[in-house]
Amino acid sequence: MNTVNLGFENKLWEMADKLRGNIESSEYKHVILGLVFLKYISDSFTERYNELLEYYPGMEEDRISYEAENVFFVPKEARWDYIKSQAKQPTIGQVIDNSMVLIERENASLKGVLPKNYARPELDKTKLGELIDLFSFNVGSKEARAKDVLGRVYEYFLKKFGTTEGEFYTPPSIVKLLVNMIEPYQGRVYDPCCGSGGMFVQSAKFVEEHSGKIDNIHVFGQEYVATTWRLAKMNLAIRGIDADLGERDADTFTNDQHKTLRADYILANPPFNIKDWGQPRLIDDPRWKWGTPPAGNANYAWISHMISKLSPRGIAGFVLANGSLSTSRSEEYEIRKAILEEGLVDCIIAMPSQLFYDVSIPVSLWFVSKNKNGRKDKVLFIDARKMGYMETRKHRELTDEESDKIYSTYHAWRDGNDYQDIDGFCKSASLDEIRSHDYVLTPGRYVGIEEAEDDGIPFEEKMEKLTSELSELFEESKSLEEKIKENLIGIGYGI
């Protein structure tokens, strides 16, 4: 499902277009998403309000009637109908800010989270009012929640404008695959670079889809960009996900908000190849048990950080640029060798290109585990580079069937349940074999070449057909050459 299917992508672009020339494009999503959350809260409130009016008249202003359905209570002057009635007023920025204050006052889990900067002078109030008038679609009703309209709106803006901050949206197909691989049924789930909280939302969905309770998982995260940290807090709060995202936005390496945490599940899409990540200030950090990562690239700092956060039964699944699989830089090589020799690397998946919006760099999925149950000297390699279909000219998607094939293969291998190597797709490699490849983890080195299916046509027949086709091509090219000569002579060129 994408925003085109939901029918409001053009409307979202029109909304962003309203802000053009007034503020930086990187700010568009923050202005609009604040309104999206406000409308989400108001839409879900209004739907519950109408239900109470119909079935329990007199209870429609009773806060407990909303809390029981995990719906935020919205005071009158913060409801969308009131905000829309004030859209043409020069005080509309103050009206929105005030509505955010009122909602926070009524709902403790949103305290200090909602944006309150709509009255600032640089935000054109006429454009802001027009923006509100454009908001015709519902984002918070039960039907909209079932379609995850809120997530799709966020996806749209991060796809369009996220890269201006170096912030990349993790495509849903990758998030779902990571979640289905590690199956976070119960325990502590951690994301050290959580963005808007998408990994947590998908984990909660996974639990609910498998007849579990959302309270079975406890969410911990950290985010460096202040506005994104607030978005994550909002995103999780309105979905009823109780999350500890630290006291504030902060850098994971130099200001770890969860120093004592040991997580059962880690899901992450850390920023790739970050050069200046603060290594000189962290030389003796206890997280570098397997060696100090190089100052010029944070990839192995992320790997080491995540392994250090795992509980004795913990498993981590994360996205990294392909260079991390085979880098020969001494510090990275030594860390990779050490974690392999310790039996921590569980599975490596080479992914197809163009899965990320506006990011062409090829990626792989890593899975490291503290609890490998007798397979410490084995690593599963999966080559999924041929999978996926082009959803647009620039973007590839995995099908549900392909995703299922990947995680079912991993589960069969992990559980000792009828797993078999498949040439060109998967291989369970021994540590000795990995040593012979000098600890390189590129799946293509291990899975071999896909065995071609025998089409039943004898070799002689194939050669005869090929010779005939080549002969026909040669005759066609001669004929074309003659026609070109005739045409050139006809228009006065001598050959």
Image (cartoon, rainbow, N blue to C red):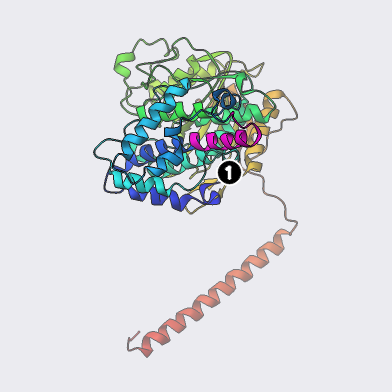
Q: Nearer the viewer, residue 29 or 131?
A: 131
**Main SS of residues in magenta:** helix
Q: Residues within 10 Å of mark 1 (few under 14, many from 20)?
A: many
Quick one: quadrant of the C terminus? Answer: bottom left
Quarter residue 118 falls in: top left
Question: How many callouts does the rendering have?
Answer: 1
**Left or right, 164 with reference to 416:** left
Could you tell me which residue is drawn at 41 percent across and 15 percent down?
Answer: 257
Q: Is residue 134 above or below residue 425?
A: below
| Residue 251, position as x, y percentages in the image | 36, 21
SS of the residue under disc 1 = loop
Residue 22, percent from left and from top: 27, 45
| Residue 427: in magenta span | no
Residue 178 x, y percent position in the rendering: 57, 31
Q: Which residues are magenta?
A: 41-59
- Is residue 194 among what the camera can see? no
In this image, 21 relative to 188: left or right?
left
Q: Does the magenta run of residues contain 57?
A: yes
- Closer to the camera in the image, 50 or 278: 50
Q: Which residue is at a point 72% across and 55% down the rendered structure image? A: 455
- The amino acid beneath tag 1 is Leu
**Residue 265 locus on image (x, y percent):** 56, 20
Q: Which residue is mark 1?
A: 398
Residue 49 in the image: above or below residue 256: below
| Residue beneath the point at 67% across and 45% down | 451
Q: Kindly identify the residue that appears in the image at 55 percent across and 77 percent down.
A: 475
